[in-house]
C-alpha cells in the first residue's frame, strides 16, 4: 500500500499513547510500514506508518510527517505479529513496537552515525572518569562503539568522551557502512547421520518444502544429536532462500554454537543479544530486513527483528524458564515463536531433552508434530544416576559434600577426569544470622534476606540488587562478631572443595562472578579444554555446555526446588536435574550423576533417578488436568504494587469484588494475597490469580476488568498471561 503526499496516515510511535495518531503523509508520499519521524508536541519522535488515517482528528489541525527514514518499511506480517502478540499478552502497542525498534541510531541520518575507538597516547590530566573510558576501550582492544554505548560502559557522561576526542586519546570516525553477512553454504557437507537422525531430518525437510506453518517438538536426550538435526533443517531453509532464526536460552552458549555453525556452513551467522555492540546490532537489524543476514542466532528479543522472509525458528532448550522473563513486556518466547511462524508460514522446531509440559501436551493433542531421538550419538551412553541418602551420611557442621561424593570426586581427579558440583544458589550463604539475638539481615527495601557474596565482600539482595558491606556488629542488637553465615551457596562450596581437594584446580561458575558475557564465555571454553578439575556452578552450568572430559556430576541439594507450594516445582526440578546430569559423560566415558537428598523416596526424585520420563510426565499431566491447571487450563497472574500496602490491598479487593467481566467469560478470581515476595524496592506487592478453562478467551475480559479500575497515586497493575509459577 502506498500513501500519496498529503493522504492521511495513522502513525504508531513508541511513546506511551493509547493509540496511533493521524498525520499527513510526507512530501513524496510513503509506504505502509514506513519508519518515519513525526512532530509530537514540541518533540520529534520515531514511528511507523501503521495504516490509513482514522479520520478521528480534525483535518485542519493535522501535522505532516517530517521525513521517511532510510530503512526498509515494516512488513505487514510483522505489524500483524506485533498486534496479535500485544492482544495475547495484553501489552499496549507502543511497548510492543519498542521491542521491534531496538535498533540503535534508527532515526539518525547517516551523517550522524559516528563511532569511537582508542586513539593515541593518554591525556596529561587523568581523571577517574577518563580512566574508565580508556579502560573500557582497552578492554575491547580495537573495537569501536557509539557515543552512548561508550559513555554507558564507562559510566560517564558523553562530554567526557568528547573531551578525550579533543585530546586525541579517543578517535571519532564515521560508522562503517552496514555490510551483509557472509553467505552460508548449505551444501558444505554435514555429518553422516544415524538412522534416527536421518529420519528426523527427512521429516523436517518435507515440512520445510511444504512451505507452510508447522511446529515440531524435537525431543532427544542430551547428546543425541538434536543440534545436528536442526542444523540440517536450517540448511534446507537456506536452500530455499529463506531466513532462519535459532534462539538459545543463554548468551554463554552461543560461542560453542557459532563454531558449529561455522564448521557446517563455512561462515558465522549474525549474533543477536545484549552483549553485542550497538553498531553490530544496528547492522544486524538492517541486514535482516534487507536479506543480508541469512541466519540469526540469539536471545529471545531476536523474535522481533524485521526478517524479510523468515522460514524457520528453532527454540533450543525450549523448556528453559529464561524464555519467559518480565522485561517490561511479559511474553514467552516459545509461544511467540509459534505465533510469528504461523503468521509468516514458517516452521518451528522446539528442541529439548526435557520438554515443558505445555509442549508435551500440545504434541499429545496433535497440535505439534513429534520427533524423537532415543539414544546418544556414538559410544556415549546416558549417565548412571544414583541418590546419596544424606540421612545416612556423617558430616561435620557447615559442610555439604558427603563422604560418598568426596570419594567419587577424588577418584575422577586421580583418573584425570573432571567433576562438577552443582548447587543452584548464588553467593556464599543465603542467610546471615546473629548468634546473639537471632536477627537475620534483610534488605531495607524488599522482603528478602541479604545474601552474602564473599568474593565481592558484600551482602546482596537478589530481588533489587542493593548491596551493602558485611557489618561486623549485628544491626539489631549491636553484638560484635556474632554474625554467622547459614547454609551454602556456590562460593561456600568452593571453599569446602578447596579444603577437601587442596591440589585440584577449581572453577566457580555463577552469573554474578563474571563482568560480561564475554568473560563467562571465555572461562567456559577454557574449562572445556581442560582448564579445571572441579567445576562448581549454579544453573548456568546446567545448560547445554559441552565438557567432554566431565564424568561426574554431584548435586548438593536435589531437594532444593521441591520446597514451596508451586505446582510447577516437580516439573522444574525434574528438568533441571536431568539437564545437569546430562552434563556427565558426553564423550566415550560413561558418566555418573549423584544426587544428595534427604528424601530419596520422593516421587520426583525417584522419577529423576529411574529416568522413566513418560511415566513422570503422564502422572504430572494427570495432576494438572485434575486441578484444571496449565497446560489444561488457563491462568493469568495480576500483580498490584504500590508504596502503601493498604491501598494496594484495597485495589485488590475492589478487583476481586467486581469480577463480573471475568465471571461472564467463565473465569474465576483468587486472591488478593501477598505476592511470593511481598515487598520489592519499597513497593508492596499483592497478587490475584485468574483461572479459566483452556478454551476461554480471557484477554478481552481481563482488559475490561482491569481497565475498569482507576489507578491512583503510585499504584501499578501488571498482567502476566501464562505465569511461570502457580501459587
Ligand atoms: P544434542 O543437541 O542433542 O545435545 P548434539 O547435536 O550436540 O546433541 O550432538 C552431541 C555430540 O555428538 C556433538 O559433539 C555432535 O557433533 C556429535 N554428533 C551427533 N550426531 C553426529 C553424527 N551423525 N556424526 C558425527 N557426530 C555427531
Ligand atoms: Zn532488595
Image (tube, rainbow, N blue to C red):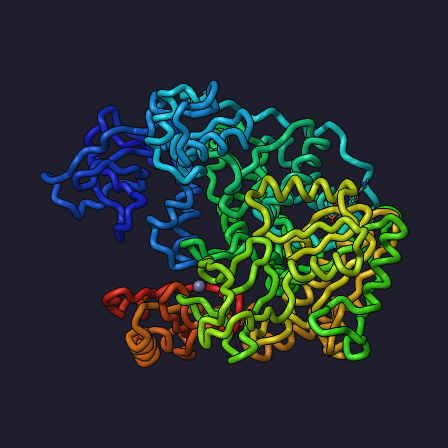
Q: Percent position (x, y) of residue 515?
A: 55, 44
Q: Can residue 639 be seen in this view?
A: yes
Residue 389, image quadrant: bottom right
In this rendering, would 663 be left or right of 611? left
Which quarter of the rendering shows the N terminus?
top left
Q: In this view, does 202 lie above or below 612?
A: above
- Nearer to the camera, 104 or 289: 104
- Ligand 2's image quarter is bottom left
In this rendering, would 155 be left or right of 410? left
| Label tally | 0
Q: Residue furthest front?
A: 480
Q: Is residue 348 visible?
A: no
Q: Residue at left 40%, top 33%?
A: 127
Q: Residue at left 51%, top 80%?
A: 437
In this rendering, would 329 be left or right of 482? left
- Nearer to the camera, 358 or 127: 127
Q: Residue at left 27%, top 41%?
A: 11
In this rendering, would 611 be left or right of 564? right
Amino acid at each position: 500500500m502506498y500513501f500519496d503526499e498529503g493522504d492521511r496516515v495513522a502513525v504508531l510511535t513508541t511513546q506511551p499513547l493509547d493509540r496511533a495518531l493521524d498525520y499527513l503523509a510526507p512530501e513524496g508520499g510513503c509506504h505502509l510500514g514506513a519508519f518515519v519521524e513525526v512532530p509530537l508536541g514540541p518533540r520529534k519522535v520515531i514511528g511507523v506508518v501503521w495504516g490509513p488515517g482514522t479520520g478521528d482528528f480534525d483535518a485542519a489541525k493535522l501535522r505532516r510527517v517530517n521525513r521517511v527514514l532510510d530503512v526498509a518499511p515494516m512488513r505487514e506480517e510483522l505489524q500483524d505479529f506485533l498486534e496479535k502478540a500485544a492482544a495475547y499478552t495484553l501489552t499496549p502497542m507502543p511497548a510492543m513496537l519498542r521491542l521491534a525498534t531496538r535498533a540503535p541510531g534508527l532515526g539518525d541520518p547517516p551523517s550522524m552515525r559516528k563511532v569511537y575507538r582508542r586513539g593515541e597516547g593518554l591525556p596529561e590530566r587523568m581523571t577517574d572518569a577518563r580512566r574508565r573510558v580508556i579502560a573500557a576501550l582497552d578492554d575491547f582492544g580495537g573495537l569501536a562503539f557509539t557515543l552512548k554505548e561508550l559513555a554507558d560502559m564507562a559510566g560517564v557522561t558523553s562530554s567526557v568522551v568528547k573531551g578525550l576526542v579533543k585530546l586525541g586519546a579517543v578517535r571519532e570516525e564515521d560508522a562503517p557502512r552496514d555490510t551483509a553477512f557472509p553467505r552460508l553454504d548449505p551444501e558444505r557437507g554435514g555429518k553422516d547421520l544415524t538412522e534416527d537422525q536421518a529420519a528426523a531430518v527427512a521429516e523436517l525437510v518435507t515440512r520445510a518444502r511444504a512451505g507452510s506453518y508447522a511446529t515440531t517438538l524435537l525431543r532427544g536426550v542430551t547428546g543425541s544429536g538434536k543440534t545436528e538435526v536442526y542444523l540440517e533443517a536450517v540448511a534446507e531453509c537456506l536452500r530455499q532462500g529463506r531466513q532462519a532464526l535459532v534462539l538459545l536460552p543463554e548468551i554463554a552458549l552461543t560461542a560453542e554454537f557459532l563454531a558449529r555453525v561455522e564448521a557446517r556452513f563455512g561462515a558465522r551467522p549474525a549474533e543477536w543479544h545484549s552483549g553485542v555492540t550497538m553498531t553490530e546490532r544496528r547492522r544486524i537489524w538492517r541486514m535482516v530486513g534487507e536479506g543480508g543476514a541469512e541466519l540469526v542466532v540469539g536471545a529471545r528479543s531476536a523474535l522481533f527483528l524485521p526478517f524479510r522472509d523468515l522460514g524457520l525458528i528453532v527454540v533450543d532448550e525450549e523448556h528453559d524458564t529464561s524464555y519467559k522473563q518480565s522485561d517490561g513486556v511479559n511474553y514467552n518466547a516459545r509461544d511467540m515463536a509459534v505465533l510469528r511462524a504461523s503468521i509468516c508460514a514458517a516452521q518451528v522446531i522446539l528442541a529439548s531433552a526435557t520438554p515443558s509440559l505445555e509442549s508435551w501436551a500440545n504434541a499429545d493433542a496433535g497440535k505439534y508434530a513429534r520427533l524423537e531421538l532415543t539414544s546418544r550419538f556414538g559410544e556415549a551412553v546416558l549417565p548412571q544416576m544414583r541418590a546419596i541418602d544424606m540421612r545416612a551420611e556423617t558430616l561435620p557442621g557447615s559442610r555439604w559434600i558427603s563422604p560418598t561424593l568426596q570419594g567419587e570426586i577424588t577418584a575422577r581427579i586421580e583418573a584425570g577426569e573432571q567433576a562438577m558440583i552443582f548447587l543452584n544458589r548464588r553467593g556464599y550463604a543465603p542467610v546471615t544470622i546473629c548468634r546473639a539475638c537471632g536477627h537475620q539481615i534483610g534488605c531495607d527495601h524488599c522482603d528478602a534476606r541479604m545474601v552474602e557474596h564473599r568474593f565481592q565482600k558484600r551482602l546482596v539482595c537478589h530481588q533489587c540488587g542493593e548491596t551493602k558491606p558485611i557489618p561486623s556488629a549485628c544491626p539489631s542488637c549491636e553484638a560484635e562478631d556474632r554474625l554467622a553465615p547459614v547454609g551454602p551457596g556456590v562460593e561456600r562450596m568452593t571453599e569446602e572443595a578447596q579444603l577437601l581437594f587442596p591440589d585440584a584446580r577449581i572453577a566457580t561458575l555463577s552469573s554474578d562472578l563474571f563482568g560480561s558475557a564475554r568473560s563467562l564465555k571465555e572461562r567456559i571454553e577454557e574449562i572445556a579444554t581442560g582448564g579445571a578439575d572441579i567445576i562448581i556452578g549454579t544453573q548456568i552450568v546446567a545448560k547445554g555446555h559441552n565438557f567432554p572430559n566431565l564424568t561426574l556430576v554431584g548435586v548438593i541439594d536435589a531437594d532444593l526446588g521441591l520446597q514451596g507450594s508451586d505446582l510447577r516445582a516437580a516439573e522444574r526440578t525434574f528438568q533441571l536435574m536431568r539437564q545437569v546430569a546430562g552434563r556427565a559423560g558426553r564423550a566415550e566415558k560413561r558418566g555418573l550423576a549423584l544426587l544428595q537428598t534427604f528424601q530419596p523416596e520422593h516421587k520426583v526424585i525417584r522419577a529423576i533417578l529411574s529416568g522413566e520420563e513418560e511415566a513422570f510426565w503422564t502422572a504430572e499431566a494427570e495432576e494438572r488436568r485434575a486441578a484444571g491447571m496449565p497446560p489444561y487450563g488457563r491462568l493469568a497472574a495480576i500483580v498490584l504494587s504500590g508504596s502503601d500496602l493498604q491501598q494496594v490491598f484495597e485495589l485488590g479487593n475492589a478487583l476481586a469484588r467486581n469480577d463480573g467481566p471475568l465471571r461472564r467469560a467463565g473465569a474465576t478470581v483468587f486472591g488478593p494475597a501477598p505476592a511470593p515476595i511481598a515487598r520489592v524496592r519499597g513497593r508492596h506487592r499483592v497478587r490475584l490469580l485468574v483461572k479459566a478453562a483452556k478454551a476461554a478467551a480471557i484477554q478481552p475480559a481481563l482488559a475490561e476488568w482491569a481497565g475498569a479500575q482507576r489507578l491512583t497515586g503510585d499504584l501499578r497493575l501488571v498482567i502476566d498471561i501464562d505465569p511461570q509459577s502457580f501459587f
